[in-house]
Image: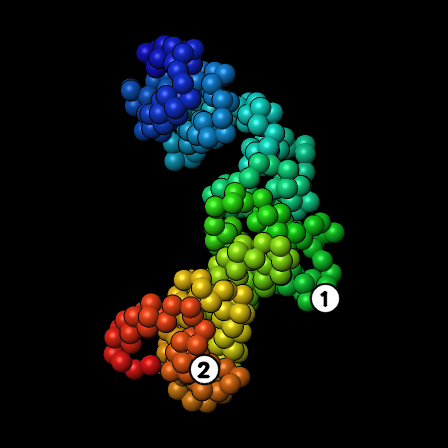
Amino acid sequence: SAWGAVGSEVARAARPSALRGLAEELAAQAVRGGGHAEGAVEALAKVAEAPAACANVETALALVEALQCCAEDSSDAPTSDKAAAIQAAGALLLRAAAAHPTSGQLALMAAAQDPAQPAPRGATVAALARSSRPQDAGEAAKLLLLAELPEADASHGAAREAKRTSAGAVGGAVGRSRVLQAMLRNLARDAPAGPIVFAHVAEAAVRGGAADVEVACDEVREVAAQLWDQPARRSQTLGAALTCELRCLGAAMMGGTLPAGGSARLAGRLVARFEELLAQLDDRDPEKEDWWIQYMEFAHQASQWGSGGDGSVRTGDASRVPRATDLHVRAMRSVGDQASFGEKAQRLLQQQGGAC
């Protein structure tokens, strides 16, 4: 076929970047089906056999993704082509994992090709994270989501109970906290911690509700406590966890679906998280200004949610949420650049109609 000839020619001479572009086009043709798709999967399989297909991790993953797209249920490719695509993707994964042993993502994906082998567990993932090259945030988040960790084999309720009773991870496997710590420590120096934390918490949110989010964020905080030798990464990690809690738990508070006293309890929890993070940040760090602003904004919102009674959030109660005006005074004594913070606080006041 015409596509087959193109695939053979490109496989012999093309650079990895050209292989990625061709693979994307071939996959698109195969998925759409029709006359123009004839031979597209065959050509893609030939491209995947080229030495350049394993030249780097990016190219190998791009070709595997293209082959997997051809095999999806939504693809209009013939059944025989789908089977060929799956076979080619598996063969490429095994070659790529051998060529790039420091890629945790390739190692996990290749391990999943052998049904006789157990799915990688927490200990395996932690070891991969420690031994692989420094990762960017996206790579690390994918590695986390690819891994079948202990909590995925049990209800999150069981995982929470194991955590409360200090039973460790389900089935004696290494807990998620050690996996998270290994991944955070192996991040490239300039890579943010946020995507890993967001992936961890999002996985818990999908499987459960607010209680599961709390457990996941507590796990992140436990990991942050172990990063004593990396203060910047520790603060980053705590900040990402607080961002998750504000989004997930704050939404639960606003939704009015919590039992009596639930809003007050969550508000107190978030207050403690703000105080913990602010204590970690240097006064000269511009991010500290932004977190004080978020704290003030949260306090203002909390005052709007409460309406009295056991389930309310009463600002000014030391055990719950401070007044935004009191936070403003504290922040002015805390931040290094008072002028910069003052401008940000003024903008917040204007957005809130002057009611802080």
Of residues 207 and 56, the one drawn nearer to the viewer in this rendering = 56
The residue depicted at 54 percent of the width and 54 percent of the height is 233
The percent coordinates of residue 69 (x first, y second) are 42, 32
The percent coordinates of residue 145 (x first, y second) are 53, 46
Of residues 89 and 196, the one drawn nearer to the viewer in this rendering = 196
The residue depicted at 51 percent of the width and 85 percent of the height is 318
The percent coordinates of residue 292 (x first, y second) are 42, 71
Q: Residues within 10 Å of mark 2 (few under 14, many from 20)?
A: many
Sequence-earlier tag: 1 or 2: 1
State how far apart marks 1 and 2 are (Cα): 33 Å
- Tell which tag, 1 or 2, sits nearer the viewer: 2
In screen coordinates, is 211 left or right of 15? right
Question: In the picture shown, does residue 91 fall above or below 298?
Answer: above
Quadrant into which the N terminus falls: top left
Q: Name the amino acid, label 1.
A: Thr
Residue 186 has which mark?
none
Q: Residues within 10 Å of mark 1 (few under 14, many from 20)?
A: few
The residue depicted at 72 percent of the width and 66 percent of the height is 165
The residue depicted at 59 percent of the width and 59 percent of the height is 224
Q: Residue furthest bottom?
A: 309
Residue indicated by mark 1: 165
The percent coordinates of residue 37 (x first, y second) are 33, 21
Instruction: Quadrant for residue 158, please give it.
Output: bottom right
Residue indicated by mark 2: 322
- Tell me whether the residue at label 1 lies in contact with that at label 2, contact meaning CB atoms closer than 8 angstroms: no
Label 1 residue SS: loop
Q: Name the amino acid, label 2.
A: Pro
